[in-house]
Image (cartoon, rainbow, N blue to C red):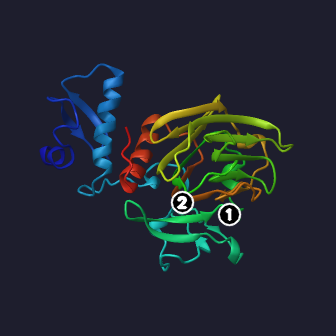
């Protein structure tokens, strides 16, 4: 065990004197010595150890989104093959094994593949005019989902009223828009959910936008709340938005599900689970994205 601890855990990562008596291959801690009784301290130590195991291939423990159960969509720009900088994107393939690829057949609406955007890794550029990618056959995993979790690595290239980075909904309303900008000055990043009659079902308005900054954004929906996290910190919360209450069948990147309110943005990665991840799981996904794209989580 000593070689695992030495390989994975740097000396300044945990409280001095804390050791681990048993850790399995996937990084689960079975005992901490000396005994830690504070739940906060236990959670902190577990998170630090999990992060170390998630970031190594030494024992086959490197974390990917499908390490967690119920991953139903995983889009990563660095997994796209056959494209060069500046090429249009027709299909962004799903790496979750669910085959929910997002596509665009209209040439003028195809976003652009760009290299070296975040931490020397590629991202997809949406023009904020009419670019979008869509999958309209994802209804089987979202129509009855009362809990779900969405993760994205993205940035805004420019501001725009109601610019929407991603959305789940119908061809029109209802829909929920993730990481949408409002019309305030300065504009804020928010979640907004609408009913079939375009009435407001939920809204959670968070931080002022910083154009050009990389965001690791997370949204977890679990009754009674839907919560937005930005760069690992809770940023806003509103009433939960249950897909089972609405007729939704598609996910759209770069605009709303009705193809409106487009965003001028970069998207590097998207992960969706049709359940609410717990706090520890949320942190693992956020840390995975943060390490990958150069945004260290708190």
Q: How many marks?
A: 2
Whichever of callouts 1 and 2 sits on the residue coming sooner in the sequence is 1
The kind of secondary structure element at disc 2 is strand
Q: Which residue is mark 2?
A: 266
* CA–CA distance in space, label 1 to label 2: 16 Å
| Residue at the extreme top of the image, as rendered | 37
The quadrant where residue 270 appears: bottom right
Q: Which quadrant is the N terminus positioned in?
A: top left
Q: Residue at x 64, y 34 (%)?
A: 204
User: Mark 1 packing: few (<14 Cα in 10 Å), some, or many (20+)?
Assistant: many
User: Mark 2 packing: few (<14 Cα in 10 Å), some, or many (20+)?
Assistant: many
72 relative position to 297: left or right: right
Q: Which residue is mark 1?
A: 134
Report whether residue 224 is seen.
yes
Q: Residue at x 69, y 71 (%)?
A: 109
Whole-percent x, y for residue 206 in the image: 58, 35
Whole-percent x, y for residue 242 in the image: 70, 39
Q: Residue at x 52, y 54 (%)?
A: 154
The quadrant where residue 24 appears: top left
Report whether residue 100 is seen.
no
The kind of secondary structure element at disc 1 is strand
Whole-percent x, y for residue 57 in the image: 27, 58
> Residue 278 or 15: which is nearer the viewer?
15
Whole-percent x, y for residue 202 in the image: 72, 35
Residue 34's place in the image compared with 218, above or below, is above
């Amino acid at each position: 065990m000593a070689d695992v601890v030495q390989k994975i855990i740097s000396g300044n990562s945990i409280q001095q004197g804390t050791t681990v008596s048993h850790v399995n291959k996937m990084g689960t801690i079975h005992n901490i010595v000396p005994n830690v009784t504070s739940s906060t301290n236990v959670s902190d130590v577990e998170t630090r150890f999990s992060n170390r195991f998630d970031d190594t291939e030494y024992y086959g423990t490197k974390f990917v989104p499908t390490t967690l159960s119920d991953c139903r969509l995983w889009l990563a720009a660095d997994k796209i093959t056959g494209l060069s900088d500046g090429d249009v994107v027709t299909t962004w393939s799903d790496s979750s094994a669910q085959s929910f690829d997002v596509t665009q057949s209209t040439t003028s609406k195809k976003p652009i593949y760009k290299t070296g955007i975040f931490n020397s890794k590629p991202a997809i550029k949406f023009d904020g005019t009419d670019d979008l990618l869509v999958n309209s056959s994802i209804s089987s995993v979202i129509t009855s989902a009362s809990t779900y979790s969405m993760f994205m690595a993205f940035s805004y290239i420019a501001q725009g009223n109601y610019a929407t980075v991603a959305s789940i909904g119908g061809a029109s309303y209802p829909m929920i828009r993730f990481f949408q900008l409002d019309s305030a000055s300065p504009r804020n990043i928010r979640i907004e959910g609408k009913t079939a009659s375009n009435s407001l079902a939920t809204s959670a308005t968070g931080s002022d936008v910083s154009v050009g900054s990389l965001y690791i954004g997370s949204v977890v929906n679990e009754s009674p709340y839907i919560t937005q996290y930005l760069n690992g910190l809770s940023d806003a919360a509103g009433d939960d938005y249950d897909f089972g209450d609405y007729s939704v069948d598609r996910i759209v990147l770069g605009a709303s599900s009705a193809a409106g309110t487009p965003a001028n943005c970069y998207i590097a990665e998207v992960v969706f689970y049709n359940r609410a991840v717990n706090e520890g799981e949320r942190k693992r996904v956020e840390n995975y994205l943060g390490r990958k794209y150069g945004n260290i989580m708190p």
